[in-house]
Image (cartoon, rainbow, N blue to C red):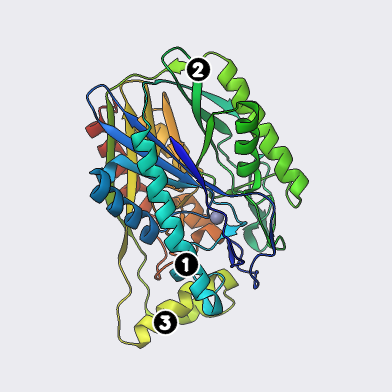
């Protein structure tokens, strides 16, 4: 294991809120990237890299993996990258376009170049630092996780829906020495780190950063790593202040500590990692469809409509699918980690339980490629912000995306040795 500070040295745009139009003005908390390398008795290696950034766009993730294959011989499928999705961290891809790179292009390029180096270095160190370990896991509860798809007379808006579905589980993986001394803890929660709003112009890891700091302070020498869950349609509640972010972080850390202090389940080998590039189906649109949609479109819909009209007017064709990586790790018969890419909505937790079985299951989102939201058929039917489609390139997902993704997950689970129906 190893970790490194990735706080930008100089002011640059923060990612996550389209309303921001100025670089950050200060730093509340440092941001970190952390790596944990694992190897089973037969020498199968895996590597998990987590970072306090909006996410890993494909450009960043694949460059890190390319270099790790070159320098450490690690296969792509052995590497899992998960971004915390803090909305008070730096822009990590020029092509993301919110806020527009414009005059900040150089600062973003410089930051991404240095971030890439740091991610690779910390990953290589973690591979060199491996020591005999015992793995155990358990699950707690996060009370602040709240569905954000508020139903109004104008349709579904970003708000608070206390009756809406959420995943409030807090998966906890404990990595200890053979004699039981804890060295690292991986934990998850499924809510956007958006306790701080778009008016907050300071670098901050939000509740995730506060939770990790709290755990590392109360357990000196331990590396605390956050793995984002399927919180695409969830927010912390309440929101709007540093105090609230700190409170959510402390509560989450307390829950992780409680789980660590209870009875955990040992994880055995062998360890199997699977990864598939899945063609996610996009909806088809004619120029007439787009013209019709553009009337009264919300701001978040205009990105797709404008981009798609531009492509058609230049004589081009709209893409029919988007290729995204989905991963599944199996730890003997004891645990399956299903890692979805994109801003995964909570329905995928239910789908994973249905298709893979509910036992010994850790469902993560925000892994390997932050291409946009990964909506379910229900969310696409109901509408709302999570239906906005690709962030880079232009496309809106077809409702069949749900089955395509879950079929791939089932296929990987079988290949990895999980017993599925
Ligand atoms: Zn988001």
Q: Which residue is mark 3?
A: 309
What secondary structure is marked by label 1?
helix
Q: Is residue 227 above or below residue 281?
A: above
Residue wearing tag 2? 181
Q: Are marks 3 and 2 in contact (CB under 8 Å)?
A: no
Q: Residue furthest bottom?
A: 314
Label 3 sits on a secondary structure element that is helix
Measured Cα–Cα span from mark 3 to mark 2: 59 Å
Residue 298 visible? The answer is: no
Mark 2 lies within 8 Å of ligand 1 (Cβ measured):
no
Q: Quadrant of residue 201?
A: bottom right
Front one among 228 and 94: 94
Callout 2: SS:
loop
Residue 272 position by quadrant = top left
Residue at 59% in and 16% down: 261
Rounded to the nearest angstrom, the CA distance separating label 1 from label 3 is 33 Å
Which residue is located at x 45 percent, y 50 percent? 376
Position of 74 with respect to 369 (left or right) is left
Does residue 37 lie above or below 345 as drawn? Answer: above
Upstream in the sequence, badge 1 or badge 2? 1
Marks 1 and 2, how far apart in space?
39 Å
Ligand 1 lies in quarter: bottom right
């Amino acid at each position: 294991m190893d970790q490194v500070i990735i706080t930008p040295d100089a002011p640059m745009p923060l990612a996550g809120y389209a309303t921001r139009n100025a670089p950050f003005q200060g730093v509340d908390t440092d941001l970190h990237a952390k790596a944990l390398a694992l190897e089973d008795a037969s020498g199968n290696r895996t590597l998990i890299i987590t970072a306090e950034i909006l996410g890993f766009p494909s450009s960043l993730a694949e460059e890190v993996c390319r270099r790790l294959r070159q320098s450490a011989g690690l296969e792509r499928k052995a590497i899992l990258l998960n971004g915390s999705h803090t909305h008070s961290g730096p822009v990590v891809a020029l092509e993301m376009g919110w806020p527009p790179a414009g005059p900040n292009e150089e600062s973003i390029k410089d930051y991404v170049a240095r971030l890439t180096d740091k991610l690779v270095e910390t990953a290589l160190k973690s591979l060199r630092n491996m020591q005999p370990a015992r793995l155990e896991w358990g699950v707690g509860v996060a009370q602040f996780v709240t569905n954000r798809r508020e139903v109004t007379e104008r349709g579904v808006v970003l708000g608070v829906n206390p009756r809406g579905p959420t995943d409030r589980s807090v998966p906890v993986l404990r990595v200890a020495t053979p004699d039981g001394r804890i060295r690292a803890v991986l934990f998850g929660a499924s809510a956007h780190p958006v306790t701080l709003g778009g008016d907050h112009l300071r670098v901050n890891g939000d509740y995730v950063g506060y939770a990790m700091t709290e755990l590392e302070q109360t357990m000196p020498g331990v590396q605390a790593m956050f793995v984002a869950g399927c919180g695409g349609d969830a927010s912390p509640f309440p929101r709007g202040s540093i105090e609230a972010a700190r409170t959510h972080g402390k509560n989450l850390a307390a829950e992780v500590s409680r789980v660590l202090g209870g009875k955990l389940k040992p994880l055995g080998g062998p360890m199997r990692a699977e990864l598939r590039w899945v063609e996610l189906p996009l909806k088809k649109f004619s120029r007439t469809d787009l013209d019709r949609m553009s009337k009264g479109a919300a701001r978040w819909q205009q990105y797709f409509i404008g981009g798609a009209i531009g492509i058609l007017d230049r004589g081009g064709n709209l893409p029919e699918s988007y290729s995204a990586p989905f991963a599944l790790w199996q730890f003997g018969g004891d645990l399956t980690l299903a890692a979805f890419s994109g801003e995964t909505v909570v329905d995928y937790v239910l789908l994973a339980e249905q298709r893979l079985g509910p036992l010994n299951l850790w469902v993560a989102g925000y892994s390997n490629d932050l291409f946009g939201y990964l909506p379910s058929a229900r969310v696409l039917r109901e509408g709302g912000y999570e239906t906005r489609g690709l962030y880079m390139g232009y496309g809106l997902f077809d409702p069949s995306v749900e089955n395509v993704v879950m079929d791939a997950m089932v296929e990987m689970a079988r290949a990895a040795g999980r017993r599925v129906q």
